[in-house]
Amino acid sequence: MALTLPRNLLRAAFASTGVQMAASEVAGVGARAPSPSESSTLCASKTDDALPDGLSPKDSAQKQKNSSPPSTDFKTTDSEVNTDQDIEKNLDKMMTERTLLKERYQEVLDKQRQVENQLQVQLKQLQQRREEEMKNHQEILKAIQDVTIKREETKKKIEKEKKEFLQKEQDLKAEIEKLCEKGRREVWEMELDRLKTQDGEINRNIMEETERAWKAEILSLESRKELLVLKLEEAEKEAELHLTYLK
């Protein structure tokens, strides 16, 4: 019974030490395995704790030696050999488990670092896409403003030409009234009718072409604007999802 108690204490001590060393190695502390001398010291300390007060290991061994027959000494030697073998097995098992835990922890760290790098690249790409979409959106707004300005300029130009035509028409009418001869009056009236017809056709064609061009340009720009707005919203949603995933 005196030999069984220290052996159990040794196993418990080495099992606890192995778990602590493996955890320290995984966390990067760099713990090392206990040397044989440290193991012996640990064994001795555990044995001392198990002895009664005032009784040293030497006294206990002497007492056991004096009170036991020679066959007991042989059993003691076998128990010590078995204890050393158990210690070596536990140490080997502990070192193997520590190495496996270290490798697994390193794999987890590498995978986490790789995922973080990929997410950073994707986030950067989304930010670039968002900037491009915003730039395109600004260009479309500027194009719409330019078309609006051109439309106002064309409208002013048509109004000016219309005023000039009315002034010319009034001048022709005044000139016709001054003419006394019927022939010249007819010529002037025919010329006036022809100018009216020609001007009406020209104005009508100009207005139709201008209106069609404006409508086509505005529809095209509005379509591009809606498409870019949708893309921008999708890019923002995607960026928000990635940011949420990173958090």
Image (spheres, helix red, strand yellow):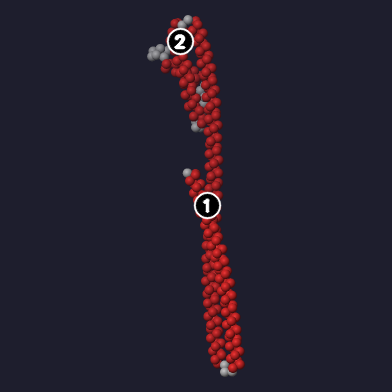
Height in image: 1 above or below 162?
Answer: above
For label 1, the residue is 235
N-terminal of the pair, mark 2 or mark 1, is 2
Residue visible at 56% across and 87% down in the picture:
172
Height in image: 11 above or below 105?
Answer: above
Nearest the eye: 236 or 36: 236
Q: Residues within 10 Å of mark 1 (few under 14, many from 20)?
A: some
Q: Give residue 103's position: percent from left, percent from top.
A: 55, 31
Residue visible at 57% across and 73% down in the picture:
208
Height in image: 168 above or below 180?
Answer: above
Q: Quadrant of residue 189?
A: bottom right
Q: Residue furthest left?
A: 53
Nearest the eye: 120 or 58: 120
Q: Residues within 10 Å of mark 2 (few under 14, many from 20)?
A: few
Disc 2 versus disc 1: nearer the observer? 1
Nearest the eye: 53 or 153: 153
